[in-house]
Image (cartoon, rainbow, N blue to C red):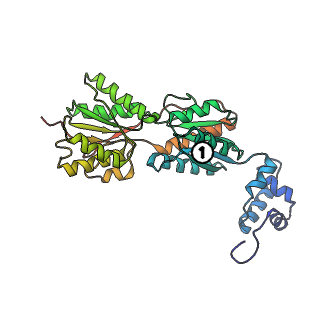
Amino acid sequence: MVSDGRRTPNIRDVAREAGVSYQTVSRVLNDSPAIRPATREQVLRVIDELGYRPNPAARALVTSRSGIIGVLSSQSALYGPTTSIQAIEVAARAAGYRLSVTSISTSDSESIRAGLDFLLGQSIEALVVLAPQVGVFDALSAMSIGVPFVTLEAPGLDPGRSISVDQTRGARLAVRHLVELGHTEIVHLAGPSDWLEAQARLEGYRSELAEAGLRPLAPVVGDWTAEFGYRAGCDLLAARDFTAVFCGNDQMALGFLHACRDAGVDVPRELSVVGFDDTPESAHFAPALTTVRQNFVEIGNRAIALLLAELGGESTLDSDPIAPELIVRASTGPARS
């Protein structure tokens, strides 16, 4: 009900006020080319005046289209996925679509299949998969999706359907920066081993060190959290057999910096630290964090553009990896002698 006590306007109210049939209003809503421009303008003016909002369910029955894009996301409050979903929603809404988002526990194959079944049961027109874990792709390959879909942040998988930042290149930028500062003993705090992004960043770490003729150290595998970065930092700083740390994301870097402060280690004079993602807070860490910037908004925009192209009958669209950018701040400096 509207706030003044009147009922919510419906399509027949619009037709009556515009002096047309409700079928004509329906054709305007569905962008029929058979409607004269003057009639279209009149109907749209009345829709705006009455505050009419089409019923999505009723419209789906008429058009055989749901107007829904499904998003399958891992259970995560991390900055990257959250930002990409926001960008996807804005781009989808601009194209006349709504989102249906469901989160899954990616370690559970039943949860993955249930999440996919839930979205497909809503007659989604397309699907975005923002859960870059190995188990998710095993489930995708075993199911008949039946709608256009795109995967995000899944480097190396689903060529032509995957949109991601070049994770390996980003890691190489981070490690190269440290090597150019004279660091030869560089530790990597890696993300979870089943995350494809973490695998790609570890590969970049190893490749850049090998190219520099340096020995990669055994990675310390974590869970993306600041708490893990702190605990790992406390353990690593007890030995201090390294001069730089490349963290798999900014949150682990934040925890590591906390451990350095507690241990009385000066960053960057005694130890250099690099993160990954460039979260908005990373510029305000103490010290400000050198990190690798990912364009999460561009990821979301490209995802919708690819899906709309496929829904429109186009089979190809640029899906080359998005270039990352190294952001140098105060947490890195020359290796101590």
**Side of 96 where 275 appears, left or right:** left
- Residue at the spot x=59%, y=48% of the render? 102
- Residue at the spot x=39%, y=33% of the render? 201
Q: Residue furthest left?
A: 337
Q: Which is nearer the eye, 37 or 77?
A: 77
| Count of numbered marks | 1
Q: Which residue position holds label 1? A: 71
Please rate how many residues cluster around mark 1, counting C-alpha atoms within 10 Å: few if below 14, some from 14 to 19, many from 20: many
**Side of 213 where 158 appears, left or right:** right
Q: Is residue 92 above or below residue 14?
A: above
The quarter of the displayed image where residue 69 is located = top right
* Picture coordinates of residue 111, whole percent (x, y): 59, 42
Q: Which is nearer the eye, 110 or 72?
A: 110
Image quadrant containing the C terminus: top left
Q: In the rendered image, is residue 36 in sight?
A: no
Q: Is residue 147 above or below residue 122?
A: above
* Picture coordinates of residue 41, whole percent (x, y): 76, 59
- Residue at the spot x=79%, y=45% of the render? 64
Image quadrant containing the N terminus: bottom right
Q: Amino acid at mark 1?
A: Val
Q: Is residue 21 above or below residue 5?
A: above
